[in-house]
Amino acid sequence: MRGLRWVLLGVPVLLALLGPLFVDDGPRGVAFGEVGVLGEDFVGRDVLAQVVLGGQSVVLIALGATVVAYGVGVPWGLGAALARRRWVDEVVMRPLDLLLAVPSLLVLLVVAGLGGGGVGVLVVVVAVVMAPEVVRVVRAAALPAATGHVVEAMRQQGEGWWRTAGYVGRTALATLAADVGVRLTSSVYLVASAAFLGVGLAPDASDWAVMVDRNQVGLSISPWGVVVPALLLVALSVGINLVLDGRVVQPRPVLDVPAAGTTRVAGLTVTVAGRRLVDDVSFEVSPGRVLALVGESGSGKTTTALALLGEAPGEVDGEVRVGGRVAFVPQHPSTALNPVRRIGPVLDEIARVHGTDPAAAMAAVGLPADRAFRRRLPHQLSGGQQQRLVLAHALLTDPALVVADEPTTGQDPHHRGEIADRLRELAGRGSAVLLLSHDLDLVRDLADAVLVLDGGRVVGSTLPAPQPRPAPRAAPTGEPVLRVDGLSVAHRRAPVLDGVTLDLRHDECVAITGRSGQGKTTLARALAGLHRPVAGEITAHGRVHYVFQDARQSFDDRRPVLDQVARTAVRLRGLSTPRARAEAVSLLGALGVAESTADRRPGSLSGGELKRAALVRALLADPAVLVCDEVTAGLDAASKRLVLDLLGARPAALVLVTHDPDAVAHLADRTLDARDGGLHDRDHAQPDEGQAHAQPGL
Amino acid sequence: MRGYLARRCLLGIGQVLALAVLVFLLVEALPGDAAVTIAGDDPDPGRIERLRVEMGLDRPLGERFADWLGSLLTGDLGASAISGRPVTDVIGAGLGVTVLLAGVTLTLLVPLSLGVGVLAARRPGSRLDRVLTTVFVGLHAVPEFALAVPLVLVFGLGLMWLPPTAVGADPLLDPLVLVLPVVVLLARPVCSVARLVRAEMVRAQDSEYVRHAVRLGLSPRRVRWGHALPNAVAPAATQLARTVDWLLGGVVVVEAVFVLPGLGTALVDSVAARDLPVVQGLTLVFGATTVAVNLAADVVAFRLAPRAGVAV
């Protein structure tokens, strides 16, 4: 296979490049000369000589046109993607739409008519036809990165335009590499088709496409003059594509229905590449009971759950028996719901397979089952409704065991309470529930039994005691550093917060809490200048730095994390690179991230490590105000402790957007609740009882 | 949605008009005009000048365009500068062949490319997948004429199973003449669409929602066609739209090889003869087709990727 593709490409290309060295393009139209092995065409010209010469034009023109199209298209597309104002993008892109609507054939005919003929003209024509496509591809490929968190983080760090453009260009490179093959072949296609139609080249030229056109009349008399050039063009096109597309197709696991067993796990061991992810784990869950698997990230919780589903990676040893079907409630329900299927038909489909009643399942999770609701698409549901819908799916399969993976991650307290209630009901209906969580409050609330995992082993069956909440701090008295007056922000044109007023002193911490979708993140981004407010004024004395909620998406995955963290101090505080790195290393160390870890690329760091690195990156700017968006979410208990201690020392004034009651209790001097489009003071003396036991139902 | 459609239609009319201006200027910029074409082998400057006055070609550019636009508003596309036939007749003659070819090709294209794409994605990395992917990639860029000629030679002239060209035949009475042209037309689009369907199917099959559907006990067949495929067709729909646009824009190479006089042939002839009224008429047809097809594709894409929202 591999050899064939090089032969296909090699023969026509070598002919095109070397052919002219061996054969002289003798006087045109001289019949009855020396005749080669392929005979003569129907007007008596030697076919072999023409075949040897005829590849040069198509190969050179196609290459030249592709180079010209990229030379124009790449800068154009990158410029459009990086435009910070929408109208610049419009002005740059709209004329291209018009150009794309002109039939490419017409462009060929007209430009060739204008320029007469010749190789140069064909190069220009083909490049003009291809360039708008290249611009669109480049812009589309660069746009996600150009509007993404990494570019925002780089702008916050004070990186220059060129470095930012360099990063964006690099992210588009993979798409462009795949695109080159398409462009090159479509360029061969255009050149050959144009030549075949008599555009650009003389009708008696020694060119494969022109030969096919010219000799077609004599097809039955001397077929070689048509067939050989046609086949060479086929070989050229196929060869280019196969060689450029030569990446190996990775085999992937095949869809398979997991096997069922009984609800007993004994001596379970999962080994992947010589590492034991799960080591001799045993437990039993009986119907109606809730067992919680607790442990920090990497402790083997998820692998154990996957083993129950029959989806564990690597080698699985030990006994896994389940007393019926296992239902899995994944961590992020939004990814488990098919984005283009209406929810009603999917419920019916699952119910048909298992002979259950969709309306009953919907009622059991507290969702309406009327026609209008059933016609909704998953994105038209709230996060809590999605979570309950996935539970309804699980119910419909009549499961013996329900495995719930971190069901409360990223949910606000109201939804957390609701999810706890649903899981409790599920157990009440006779299912066994296996709960995987770091959310110790939820586990305390729900579980009948607990297994603590560490490094793949069972290390205990009791929970750590709740952390004592600190005494309220003395009221801050420092200078005001941030003043927000009448601020209104909108998300996709829908107003979320209106008339926000806030004063922040230099040693103060304000926590902003509230249910999801109330505009907390939008407000935080607006404070740091990443989001344009609709109205109002923000006055800051000193730098306001935002710490991204999704840390992983804010790091360039091709550079070591430490370099990216240290850049802040280089750009914003003018430190030398070694000094900036030293500072970064010491701060990272204080948060439990070793230098050797930070010196790797983001891909080999855990979510929690990146979260802490993002915090250090912001701290290195020596900001007056630090805006932290869910800075403790997804951290295990030990790391969270370190982060809270560090922030408790007040390296800057803090705006803390969070759902985490621990963070509020440890850090906040006052708490504002985002609801109904505004921020409302919450009395701090009385901890909010509603957080632990929210009312069920909507 | 209705407001969106109205806005897009207005924008489309604007685009078609801008296109008409652009093409008018482009053809105007070409050396020679219809008078030179009619004068033919007897290019006597005096005679050409007289012809120009007679045909009104000596009038200023703006005035002629305004005239054309004025009669367009009354629904009149004018008459060919060369033959004097009404432009609508010239277009109508080619339209039949073009629509027939496009219709037959498209009817076969959709099921074929979806089926082959899903088949290849069924077991990614398997022998079948590797063979199909190689064919998609390889055949995708072969110019139609280079594919047509060997086919004609083998099936038309060698085995004599099929007519080599459609000269003098009415495709409706003798559908066999359409077999080779449609096969040649299908080759490239099947590859490009099936390749996209395969890639998106592989991605969809690897998604959490497909794993979720499998865990819920749905049959692999239902999961493949009912859950994965609807998520895999959005990019293919865009590619299909471009294919429809290409098919309706006159497939000039296939028309030339098989002697099927469609719109592509009409365009080549009219540009060569500098027959501006016909070129303008064809531009309107092609422009309107492009706008309509893209609008349809965006509406379909909106349903297939509901979270992206409607982009204007």
Image (tube, coloured by chain):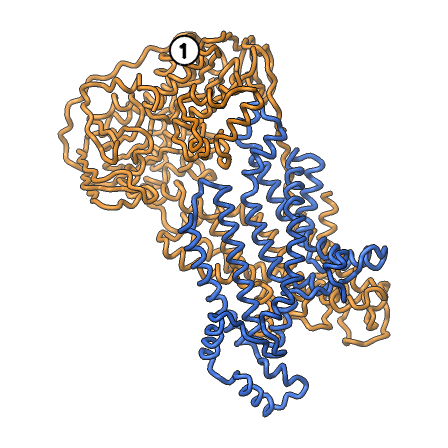
Chain colours: A orange, B blue
Residue at the image position 63 percent from the left and 69 percent from the top: B266
Residue A472: which quarter of the image?
A: top left
Residue at the image position 70 percent from the left and 46 percent from the top: B135
Pinpoint residue B89: horizontal percent, then vertical percent: 61, 70
Q: Which of the chains bears the disc numbered 1?
A: A
Taking A26 as reference, is B215 above or below it?
above
Check the picture and name the quadrant holding the N terminus of chain A: top right
Pinpoint residue A598: horizontal percent, then vertical percent: 42, 31
**Crowding at label 1, few (<14), some or many (≥20) Cα neighbours within 10 Å?**
some
Pinpoint residue A98: horizontal percent, then vertical percent: 48, 62
Q: Which residue is the site of mark 1? A: A447
Instruction: Name the foreground residue: A226 vs A680.
Output: A680
Residue at the image position 29 percent from the left and 46 percent from the top: A532
Q: From this viewpoint, is residue B105 visible?
A: yes
SS at badge 1: loop
Taking A475 as reference, is A129 above or below it?
below
Q: Residue furthest bottom?
A: B46
Residue A582: which quarter of the image?
A: top left
Give the residue type at disc 1. Answer: Ala
Q: From this viewpoint, is residue A240 visible?
A: no
Left or right: residue A417 versus residue A250 is left
Taking A512 as reference, is A218 above or below it?
below
Residue at the image position 21 percent from the left and 38 percent from the top: A500
Instruction: Name the foreground residue: A396 vs A412.
Output: A396
